Image: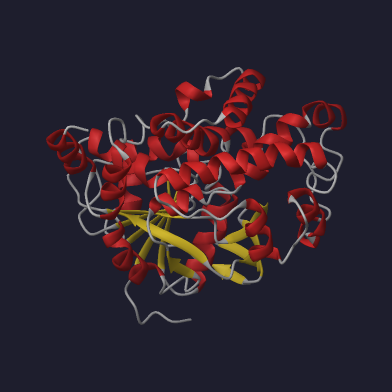
Amino acid sequence: MSTSHGTVFAVVGAGHGGQAMAAHLALQGFRTRLYNRRAHRLYPIRVRGGIELDGEVRGFARLEQATTDLRKAIDGADVIMVVVPAFAHAAVARAMAPHLASGQVVLLNPGRTGGALEFAHVLEQAGCQGRAIVAEAQTFIFASRSVGPAMSRIFRIKNAVPIAALPAGDTASCLERVVVAFPQFVAAPNVLKTGLDNVGAIFHPAPTILNAGRIEDTHGAFEYYHGGITPSVARVMEALDAERVAVGQALGIEVMTAHEWLEMAYGATGQNLWEAVLDNAGYAGIRAPASMETRYLSEDVPAGLVPMASLGRHLGILTPTMDAIITLASTVHAVDYWADGRTVERLGLAGLEPDAIRALVEKGGMASARESAAIVGV
């Protein structure tokens, strides 16, 4: 266990991913704090004095802190790893704004679509004085679960996870801080790329909505991918994916299709998306959600489909399939995801043309991008 470096990590969120991340960091010898808004998840960790980690990484991890005091958790931390559902990012940003210091790195794990943009916009609105580096990961680095009180298991550590900072010029500084613990992180071009490569928005909401009756009747007692994705469901997913790719093209971003992603991530191939899903042995045995109260809707719709569709509207790109799934998910959950989700207004992109959006993510802060847009009359 190496302690030759002095990097201090704070992990925000003590769910499945947060506990695994905090334990993994502590086992590597990093000073590690764990924050959670509610105390009940921290209580067993405090009693045991740490977290027992199993799977790809094993050992008993002793944390420096397990606290409900956010200021205390992030004070003096070099890197703040935010590991909460994407729908909680804005609330975390508001709570963190008074306490952030210049030079700290805040990395969203993952950002889903528009995470860093929303987080930075909320910090600005809250009057945050610290010039922190805000960044996002394209996906979560682990497949992990909490398997008992103060016990976590890492089933798999991904080989490579792209990350990008806002603006992109800060990515190198962010990467330098985090690769000491996670060499799997690699630089992505910008947060538009990490956000629009969010294939979870394609693989989760549509199959869940289209299998609603089956999910509620069987409580998820069927295979989600190899049973729930039929040729018709896959065609809906392909239509969603084409709309996502079109939004990326309008922003000058080369987006990987879901079909291409399956081949890249799993070596799965086929003549169409349905055949590629069936060809993916990694999906075998994965069960459907037990109910419609699932993050496949509550997270992937407002933090995945809504920002993509909202960007589409903003750029004049039609997204009828996305619009339909968002409307159906809103109806099922009795929530207006158009109002609650990450629209261009919530991302701080309202009034910006594609060139100004690209300039924002590449070079400038929120305020300077809007000032530039006003000067050129966009």
For this rendering, which residue is in front, 55 or 245? 245
Colouring of the image = secondary structure
Q: Find residue 119 and report its horizontal and vertical position in percent.
A: 35, 42
Give me the residue at 60% from left, 51% from top. Answer: 16
Give the left or right position of residue 54, taking residue 228 as reference.
Answer: left
Task: Quadrant for residue 98, please give it.
Answer: top left
Query: In the image, what residue occupies the spot 34% across and 65% down?
Result: 8
Q: Which of 200 and 157 is in front in this view?
A: 200
Q: Quarter-wise, where is residue 221 in the image?
A: top right
Residue 82 seen anywhere in this rendered image of the structure: no
Point out residue 64 in the picture as x, y percentages from the top left corner: 41, 62
Instruction: Give the position of the C terminus as an image quadrant.
Output: top left
For residue 349, above or below residue 197: above
Relative depth, front residue between 328 and 178: 328
Residue at horizontal 54 percent and vertical 31 percent from the top: 319
Q: In this view, does 175 lie to the left or right of 219?
A: left
Q: In which quarter of the view is residue 350 placed?
A: top left
- Percent from the top left, x then y, of residue 176? 34, 71
